[in-house]
Amino acid sequence: MKPAGIKYGLLLVTIVALLLHTGTVRAQSLGFKGQAIGWTTLNPAEPFQAQVGLRYIPELSFSLPAGKYSIDGKFSANIWGSSMWQGDSTTLDKELSPYRMWLRFSGDQFELRAGLQKINFGSAQMFRPLMWFDRIDPRDPLQLTDGVYGLLGRYYFLNNANIWLWGLYGEDKIKGWELLPSLKNSIEYGGRVQLPLYTGEVALTYHHRTADPTAVLPDSITQGMQAPENRIALDAKMDLVVGLWTEISLIHQDLSFTEQQYKTMLNVGMDYTFNLGNGLNMMGEGFAYLQGEQPFANEEGVVFGLLSASYPVSIIHNVSAMVFYDFTNNGFYRFINWTVAYDKWSFYVMGFWNPETYSLYNVDPRTSLYGGWGFQLMAVFNH
């Protein structure tokens, strides 16, 4: 059976087992909810592009007491389809896949979680050097992202320090800032130590994997090689008069066909909420993505700056805007979002004005159409 078939089969068997077991589980320990999303994106610049899409994420969760411990789980699917019209051609895309599928055993100071899950951490808000295992676009109001298959353990000390350890199943797809996917069926591993620091925290993170250049590059270049990769990162945040944070990530890939084996990502940011009306929140970040033969070398890279603002007009209405500037290529990225949120319904009216060559984030191309200028309308129903 193919790996995808195994994943879908495991999801189905687990859900069926839970449903059959409901007779011995208290009703309040079971939950079902879902999120339905519809969107349309218009990009009038030549060539004219339009996209219409629907997504539904049903989620089944349960929780069981086990003495002083507990066992819980979450199982959800990603069901979506979209149609894009560009010039005289129309393309259809669809997918049915697991979205989250994990079980957790936990106590007062620890948790052990296994399965398809979201793993993210770090202090940065928009440009995240520690975006290692997700692909969250900060402009996405729903913050949706694919998960990773793995085992995650966390222990929380009484002084608010915590330690993370994980092992991941290597899949042949891109995650985070990666340009090369992991070697399929390989094992990735890493950990994180987070310590309290004055009014904030500081953390050190490490991860190891084996990248697979043959998945995206011709054999004449790679000659079947594999690329061991090590990542190390330091991040900190602190709440003073303003909120301050920083992240730095260093990545080394053992690639024989290039001398630029080091990638460095740096982020420094701050935010403050002004006492104006209902509270105007302003945020600024600086970000650098560097490549070179040595750590922190800048033989090739990009530098971005960010300024964002968010204002709650009322309990229902919120307006936010972001401006990114590419100092390397002298390009502006602009994004504005008006949100109307009710109990179960949310509506988003978004506008963007970006360079034609869109290279700001390693976003999911299936649901992103942000090159040039245009508009996006989105409706979300939660039940």
Image: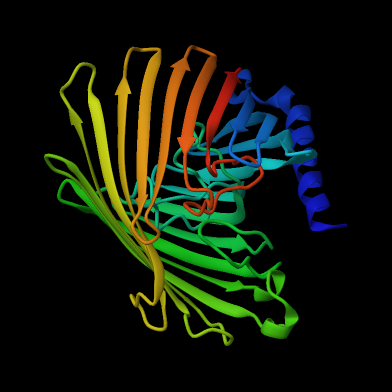
| Depth order, front residue of 236/43 | 43
Q: Residue at x 75, y 28 (%)?
A: 19
Using the rendered image of the protein, determine whether residue 203 is visible from the camera's viewpoint: no
On the image, the x and y values in percent for residue 114 come to: 60, 51
**Could you tell whether 354 is left or right of 182 in the image?**
left
| Depth order, front residue of 66/115 | 115
Image quarter where the C terminus lies is top right
| Depth order, front residue of 359/47 | 47
Image quarter where the N terminus lies is bottom right
How many marks do you count on the picture?
0
On the image, the x and y values in percent for residue 221 come to: 67, 83
| Depth order, front residue of 296/119 | 296
Q: Is residue 143 above or below residue 262?
A: above
Q: Is residue 224 above or below residue 365?
A: below
On the image, the x and y values in percent for residue 84 come to: 72, 36
Q: Is residue 316 above or below residue 261?
A: above
On the image, the x and y values in percent for residue 80 come to: 72, 34
Using the rendered image of the protein, determine whether residue 284 is visible from the camera's viewpoint: yes
Q: Residue at x 58, y 37 (%)?
A: 72
Q: Residue at x 36, y 78 (%)?
A: 295
